[in-house]
Amino acid sequence: MIEDTLLEAEEKMDKAVEVAKEDFASIRSGRATPSMYAKVIVDYYGSPTPLQQLASFATPEARTILITPYDKSALRDIEKALSDSEVGANPSNDGNVIRVTVPELTQERRKEYVKIVRGKGEDAKVSIRSIRRKAKDELDRIVKDGDAGEDEGARAEKELDALTKSHTDLVDELLKRKEVELLEV
């Protein structure tokens, strides 16, 4: 039972780190990447659809991205979704592809992005700590019910603390890398 609880906590913490990675990737730096558009939702025939399911992406230059819709009739909808998104894109289309040129980031905008990234990093760490708290409550319940001894409970709690620390350290490392990427001119 203790092992199951620890394994479940580790899986949930891994997912929290993955979500943080995706969140960090969706915040743009000075380069154009397809992951910037991961959270863009297009109204495709009345149903909200992620952009990545409707088009392919190519980056011919560092600050230019080409979006080629699989269905040419969705070109206008994709362009509208890009204009309305938080990405800050000015799309233009030639009838076949949508070309997005990512503007150069100002120092002020870079600092805003760093604040956003720090907030998302803190959210991920809060999530990890919450997972730890729930797992700790479960471990305490197992010991209280007599399904495991107090020594086993204490050992499991130390393991849980080590898991929590390793995952929060991983988020901190990802955060540090993203900050460096954002502040790099």
Image (spheres, rainbow, N blue to C red):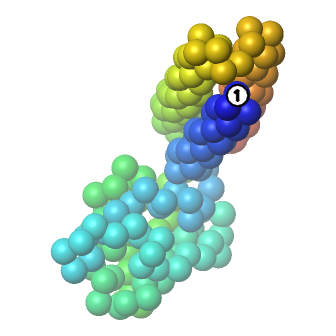
Visible residue check, residue 171: no
Drawn side of residue 20 relative to residue 53, left or right: right
Reply above or below: 90 against 183.
Answer: below
Residue 182: which quarter of the image?
Answer: top right
Reply above or below: 69 against 46.
Answer: below
Residue under label 1: 2
Q: Amino acid at mark 1?
A: Ile
Residue 41: which quarter of the image?
Answer: bottom left
Reply above or below: 7 against 85.
Answer: above
Visible residue check, residue 25: yes
Quadrant where the N terminus is found in the figure: top right
Residue at left offset 70%, top offset 28%: 2
Of residues 66 and 2, which is closer to you in this image? Answer: 2
Estimate the x, y position of residue 75 in percent, counting from the top left. Answer: 33, 82
Residue farthest front in this picture: 146
Estimate the x, y position of residue 5 in percent, counting from the top left. Answer: 65, 32
Of residues 21 and 153, which is closer to you in this image? Answer: 153
